[in-house]
Image (cartoon, helix red, strand yellow):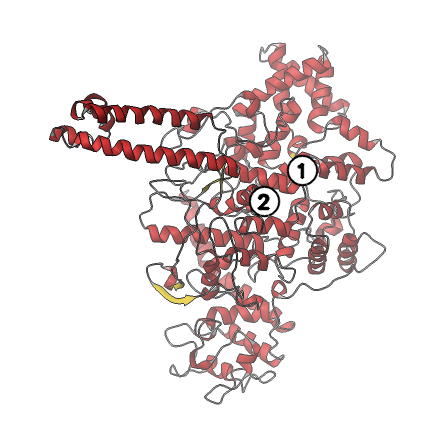
């Protein structure tokens, strides 16, 4: 390690030089083309000017964030920016002035660099156009550039033609159907499924299979998992105790059902953001509002006020990034450094949520988050039973106190603690007259009857939702530097200024929780067809999970620091089509997977690769590794043990003592499930934030504390070690071997052939079979394994094949 240090120091010393060279190249490139306000100029103004002359603060009555303010004459008679005339623009004079009393930024800040001044000067000379960033522009009406192609291919092929890039040839039918099964259901096709499709001569065979898969229950399980990543779904609170969130699994089932029923996406969002404030509040909408309870929660914070604002910040982050593709959370402590989002915007958005109660209290962790959704009649029966119990116990308490005051001081003190019932049982009768004791005994007997009557009632159902809201809330204030202990100006609920929508006119709603309707106003604004981001963001996510990356590669950030869309017109058209189709997702899936772009192979085309090595133009389909859930579910499916039971409480996979010991209290909160339950799909695994099962964690399961826009897809040695040595796959190898003996008989060659066929979903080549037979023979002769154990280790080998772990 010591030998590396001089090289590291050298590389660090070169870093500023390299960055300067990159900056020079970028500035020169900007000068050669028209300087773009959004990409080139706004970042300079945001970093260097907006703190004093931006959307929140306008010192000297000067604002540089919009054209009208920046080009108008100020009170002192100067024009900050004169389009086409940089030399007479006050801003150029001030940023180039050497007198510290006149120079801007002020002396305590670094002056603009020559390159930054050059960008401003060039931009002003070019006309000082304030063009909006692409994502902040209204959704334009777009038509495909060609009517002869599939509409998606019209956009894709136009870009390929402009770049003279040759696309890869179509994927063969066996490859395509396997890709389709995984993308739509997260499960592999059986070899028989593949064979039937490959040999189906019908011209619409593919389209029929698409429709069948979209209609299958497994579709909802697959696509629900993508949404659960976005909303940071888990079933515990995190922090040291990491206690369970009762009924969190019902939210997961709600999402699965929403995808399977093709619930319109705008309705899907409204139910989650305002499920307790809608005109028709149902069990389903209350479960959906459990969205607000999914985040982490500290049940014993050192700073309770800060903890509350951290909880709200997690919600704002998830809403803004997950649903709007905006990093509004960056403005919690100060105006956003890059995007036109002020600190006032952040707290105006937080004001929509000011009635939300925290998840719970230390005394009662689930106090605000569990809602009784039983029938009105059943709730009434429980309420009457509990009323009678309260009245009866009040009478009992009165009699008890009559006896207690006659007891010794020691016994009286004992009744104030957990020994109360013992003392009463032994000594109360001694201190009451016979009539009061008889009355007390009658009350005790009636109490027992009421308790028994309650036990006979059908069980009540509760869901995780918003049980209470805060009443008479204080006005929301901007927190100076994000510190809740230093409140600033009052703000009202309002939408970020960049949308130009201002504040809602009024709030009016009658809800079971007694809330004002602010969250409903937020939900309706977000799902309005004029909102320029909501449909774009979801259309991009759907594309992302079919192609491995979005048209915008940063799905949670459509802002200036995000990656621009490779096909902006296509993205606009998809969003427009999405809304025109009633916000239904299944038609959009069908549209995407029936395109030629989706059906291309991953074949290497050298010239195309040289021109577009990142495949930005979708000239081929990118090979991808299966996700953690797909690997686990596929292994269960191939070995014959997959249990397709849907819904219900989550199950607990078997974990080793080594894994359980990673907790502060080893094994705390981890249950035991039957083998049949453990064979269910991975989406039904109990997600404990502090204890993610290794078969998920090893393969890039996301951090559940924060919204996940896209999972890491790593390929590393630890994964291979987990696959070959892990208990899960070794146990499944036994099951796989049993399946092969049952289906292929005692013929080893037939066993190998069937095993490879199940793993790869194709007919194996003779060479593949020969290699499998050779492995079995070596295990028996060189390692002394029995025939049964040799077959087991062949099965383990087969489950580790790249062809099993990757989708082409």
Q: Which mark is residue 219?
A: 1
Q: Residue at x 50, y 75 (%)?
A: 114
Question: 323 and 162: which one is in front?
Answer: 323
Q: Quadrant of the N terminus?
A: top left
Whether residue 417 is visible, yes or no, is: no
- For label 2, the residue is 227
Question: 215 and 536: which one is in front?
Answer: 215
Q: Are marks 1 and 2 in contact (CB under 8 Å)?
A: no
Which residue of the protein is positioned furthest toward the front in this rendering?
435
Can you say whether 193 is above or below 605 in the image?
above
Can you say whether 48 is above or below 755 in the image?
below
In terms of sequence position, does the residue under pointer 1 or pointer 2 come before the other?
1
Residue 637, x across and y down, in percent: 65, 26
Disc 1 crowd, CA 10 A, few/some/many (<14, 14-19, 20+): many
Q: Quadrant of the C terminus?
A: top right
Q: How many marks?
A: 2
Residue 266, x across and y down, in percent: 63, 52
Instruction: Give the alpha-carbon distance from disc 1 to disc 2, as whole Å.
Output: 13 Å
Q: Image quadrant of residue 791?
A: top right
Question: 522 and 652: which one is in front?
Answer: 522
Whether residue 744 is visible, yes or no, is: yes
Residue 716, x across and y down, in percent: 55, 37
Which residue of the protein is positioned furthest toward the bottom in this rendering?
77
């Amino acid at each position: 390690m010591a030998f590396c240090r001089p090289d590291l120091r050298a590389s660090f010393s070169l870093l500023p030089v390299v960055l300067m060279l990159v900056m020079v190249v970028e500035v020169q490139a900007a000068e050669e083309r028209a300087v773009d306000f959004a990409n080139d100029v706004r970042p300079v103004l945001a970093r260097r000017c907006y703190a004093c002359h931006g959307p929140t603060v306008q010192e000297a009555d000067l604002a540089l964030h919009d054209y009208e303010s920046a080009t108008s004459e100020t009170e002192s008679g100067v024009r900050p920016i004169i389009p086409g005339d940089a030399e007479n623009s006050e801003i150029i004079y001030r940023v180039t002035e050497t007198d510290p009393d006149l120079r801007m930024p002020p002396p305590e800040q670094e002056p603009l660099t020559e390159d930054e001044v050059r960008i401003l000067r060039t931009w002003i000379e070019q006309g000082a156009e304030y063009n909006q960033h692409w994502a902040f522009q209204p959704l334009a009406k777009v038509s495909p550039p060609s009517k002869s192609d599939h509409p998606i291919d019209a956009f894709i092929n136009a870009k390929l033609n402009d770049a003279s890039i040759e696309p890869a040839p179509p994927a063969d039918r066996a490859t395509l159907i396997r890709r389709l099964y995984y993308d739509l259901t997260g499960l592999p096709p059986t070899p028989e499924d593949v064979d039937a499709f490959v040999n189906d001569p019908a011209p619409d065979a593919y389209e029929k299979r698409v429709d069948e898969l979209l209609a299958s229950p497994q579709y909802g399980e697959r696509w629900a998992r993508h949404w659960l990543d976005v909303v940071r779904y888990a079933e515990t609170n995190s922090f040291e105790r990491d206690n369970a969130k009762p009924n969190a699994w019902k939210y997961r089932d709600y999402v699965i059902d929403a995808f399977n029923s093709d619930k319109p996406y705008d309705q899907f969002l409204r139910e989650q953001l305002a499920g307790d404030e809608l005109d028709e509040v149902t069990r389903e909408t209350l479960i959906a509002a459990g969205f607000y309870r999914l985040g982490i929660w500290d049940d014993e914070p050192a700073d309770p006020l800060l903890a509350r604002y951290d909880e709200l910040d997690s919600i704002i982050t998830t809403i803004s990034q997950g649903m709007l593709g905006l990093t509004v959370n960056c403005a919690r402590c100060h105006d956003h450094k890059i995007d036109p989002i002020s600190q006032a915007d952040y707290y105006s958005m937080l004001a929509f949520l000011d009635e939300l109660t925290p998840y719970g209290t230390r005394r009662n962790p689930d106090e605000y988050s569990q809602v009784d959704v039983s029938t009105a009649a059943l709730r009434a029966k429980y309420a009457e039973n509990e009323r009678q119990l309260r009245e009866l116990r009040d009478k009992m308490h009165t009699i008890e106190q009559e006896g207690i005051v006659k007891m010794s001081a020691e016994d009286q003190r004992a009744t104030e603690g957990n020994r109360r019932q013992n003392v009463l049982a032994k000594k109360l009768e001694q201190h009451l007259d016979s009539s009061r004791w008889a009355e007390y005994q009658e009350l005790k007997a009636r109490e027992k009857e009421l308790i028994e009557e309650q036990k006979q009632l059908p069980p009540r159902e509760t869901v995780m939702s918003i049980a209470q809201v805060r009443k008479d809330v204080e006005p929301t204030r901007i927190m100076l530097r994000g510190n809740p202990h230093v409140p600033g100006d009052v703000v009202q609920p309002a939408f970020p200024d960049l949308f130009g929508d201002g504040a809602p006119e009024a709030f009016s709603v009658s809800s079971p929780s007694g809330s004002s309707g602010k969250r409903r106003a937020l939900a309706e604004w977000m799902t309005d067809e004029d909102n320029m981001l909501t449909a774009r963001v979801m259309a991009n996510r759907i594309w992302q999970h079919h192609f491995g990356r979005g048209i915008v590669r940063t799905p949670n950030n459509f802002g200036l620091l995000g990656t621009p869309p490779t096909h902006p017109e296509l993205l606009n058209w998809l969003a427009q089509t999405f809304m025109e189709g009633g916000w239904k997702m299944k038609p959009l899936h069908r549209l995407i997977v029936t395109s030629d772009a989706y059906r291309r192979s991953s074949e290497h085309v050298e010239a195309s690769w040289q021109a577009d090595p990142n495949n930005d133009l979708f000239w081929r389909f990118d090979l991808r590794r299966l996700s953690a859930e797909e690997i686990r579910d596929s292994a269960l499916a191939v070995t014959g043990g997959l249990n397709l039971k849907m819904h219900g409480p989550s199950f607990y996979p078997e974990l080793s003592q080594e894994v359980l010991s990673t907790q502060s209290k080893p094994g705390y909160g981890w249950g035991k499930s039957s083998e049949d339950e453990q064979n269910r799909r991975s989406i039904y695994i109990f997600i404990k934030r502090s204890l993610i099962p290794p078969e998920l964690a090893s393969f890039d399961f996301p951090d559940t504390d924060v919204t996940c826009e896209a999972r890491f897809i790593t390929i590393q040695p630890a994964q291979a070690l987990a696959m070959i040595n892990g208990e899960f796959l070794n146990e499944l190898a036994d099951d796989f071997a049993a399946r092969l003996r049952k289906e292929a008989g005692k013929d080893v060659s037939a066993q190998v052939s069937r095993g490879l066929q199940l793993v790869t979903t194709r007919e194996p080549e003779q060479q593949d079979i020969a290699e499998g037979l050779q492995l079995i023979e070596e295990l028996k002769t060189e390692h002394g394994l029995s025939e049964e154990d040799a077959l087991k280790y062949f099965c383990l080998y087969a489950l580790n094949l790249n062809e099993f772990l990757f989708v082409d």
